[in-house]
Image: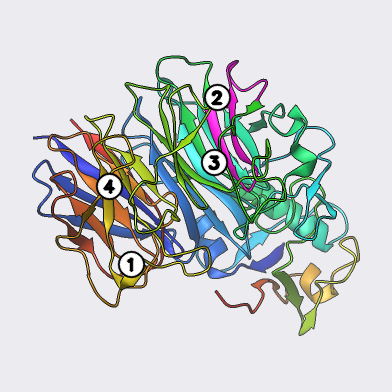
Amino acid sequence: MSGVRVLVGTVKGAFVLTADGKREQWEVRGPHFGGWEIYHVKGSPADPDRIWSSQSSGWFGQVIQRSDDGGRSWEAVGNEFVYDGVPGTHQWYDGTPHPWEFARVWHLEPSLTDPETVWAGVEDAALFRSTDGGKSWAELAGLRGHGSGPHWQPGAGGLCLHTILLDPADPERIFIAISAAGAFRSDDGGATWKPINRGLRSEGILPEPEAEVGHCVHRIAMHPSRPETLFMQKHWDVMRSDDAGDSWREVSGDLPSDFGFAIDVHAHEPETVYVVPILSDSEHYPPEGKLRVYRSRTGGGEWEPLTAGLPQGDCYVNVLRDAMAVDALDPCGVYFGTTGGQVYTSSDAGDHWTPIVRDLPRVLSVEVQTLP
Amino acid sequence: MIRVVLPAHLKTLARVDGEVEVEVEGPATTAAVLSALETRYPTLRGALRDHATHQRRALVRFFACGRDLSHEPPDAPLPEAVADGTEPFLVVGAMAGG
């Protein structure tokens, strides 16, 4: 029988949650790398036994771990992330130039076809790639070098490259997003880049609300069957593009708040989208203390609250940008982790929810592998 | 032979238990000990000091013989008792919350 493996990164270690295709009985393994911040754990679509983990700490820096047996054992691989050439400066919070400094890997995106190749989005924002199984890393410097890099400013969480989307229909096309610079696209395998932020408005945040760069994009999601269509959770506003990011329109519709971090798309329905509304940019918890996932079956605009099994009172957790994922089973499973340490699952596309675990450390990321 | 005591997280990363011992070529200095450690335990590269600049990570400290050597020049000779293996060289994660 098929099954799922849920990969959870927390501020104090990684956890691997497994179940068969019914998704009722769960085995919890971990913490792996206990005591370390695990920003992201993700499996290779080309080899499900290969899993990558970004492990870091304020004391001892960045470690990249690789498993070749589905997360049972791990090996530390290369961790030298050196900016290409003279790194230059970006803007600091006060607008002064600040040298680019590597802090950590926020996101690891394995190649869709080659288990040896993996992309890394880092803070301070840059894109790296390894083609030798993680032994060595090289920056794709065209991103920082495309022109606007010196004007990028960090968001509250740092100047982080947190989203990497690989186009399954075009191996040369890559989308990335940076807080607080915006979204960018490459059509030549990462050599050159252009900002794709037309239609985004950051009223009251940017002096020029429709600036080409400077938007705090929190997350972008794509359905693999429609790589031209992108869904974005911005600092405020849920957005949609149907031309690979060349233009965006707002689809926040009737959401109780259009602030949030996580966004994802149903595995089998490209127009079914999930978000978790958060009250505001300073109040990082759900409106009214009710933890609600909102689902749109119309590609945005019209949203329905999904509440069954989720706390509907006195709930003040957050769901971070990399902490929502879907499996590929039928019906589609949806998963998210909270800053309160819960990982919730729905095995009916969001209609009903149940916690897999309730008491993990603050959850930073959730990914799911659907196993044969 | 220089004895080195690693903090628990770095023991896990290096997959060692207890003290480790390293040989250094030439004078026994902090830089030489760190290079020997990184050669013998490559997973420690980047965890103690920057890969390229060799600047000590801000929250890593080096103690020996009751002294904090963290701010000594990396090429300064270590105490004789460390160089001859009588006393260990301690790598310490600085006191910090989180």
The residue carrying pointer 2 sits among few (fewer than 14), some (14 to 19) or many (20 or more) residues within 10 Å by Cα, namely some
Residue A303 bears which disc, if any? 4
Q: Nearer the viewer, mark 4 or mark 1?
A: 4
- Residue beneath disc 2: A246
Specify which label sits upstream in the sequence, 4 or 1: 4
**Cα distance, mark 4 to mark 1?**
30 Å
Q: Chain of mark 4?
A: A
**CB within 8 Å, label 1 to label 2:** no
- Residue beneath disc 1: A360
**Is residue B25 visible to the viewer in this orientation of the structure?**
yes
Compared to residue A75, the image places residue A32 above or below, namely: below
Start-end of magenta stretch: A175-193
Q: Nearer the viewer, mark 1 or mark 3?
A: 1
**Residue at image location 23% in from the left, 37% down from the top:** A297
- Residue beneath disc 3: A77
Specify which label sits upstream in the sequence, 1 or 3: 3
Compared to residue A345, the image places residue A299 above or below, namely: above
Q: Which amino acid, mark 4?
A: Trp
Specify which label sits upstream in the sequence, 1 or 2: 2
**Cα distance, mark 2 to mark 3?**
37 Å
Q: Chain of mark 3?
A: A
Q: Are marks 4 and 2 on the same chain?
A: yes
Q: Which amino acid, mark 3?
A: Val
Q: Which amino acid, mark 2?
A: Asp
Secondary-structure class at tag 1? loop
Secondary-structure class at tag 4? loop
**Residue at image location 63% in from the left, 48% down from the top:** A180
**Residue at image location 69% in from the left, 59% down from the top:** B48
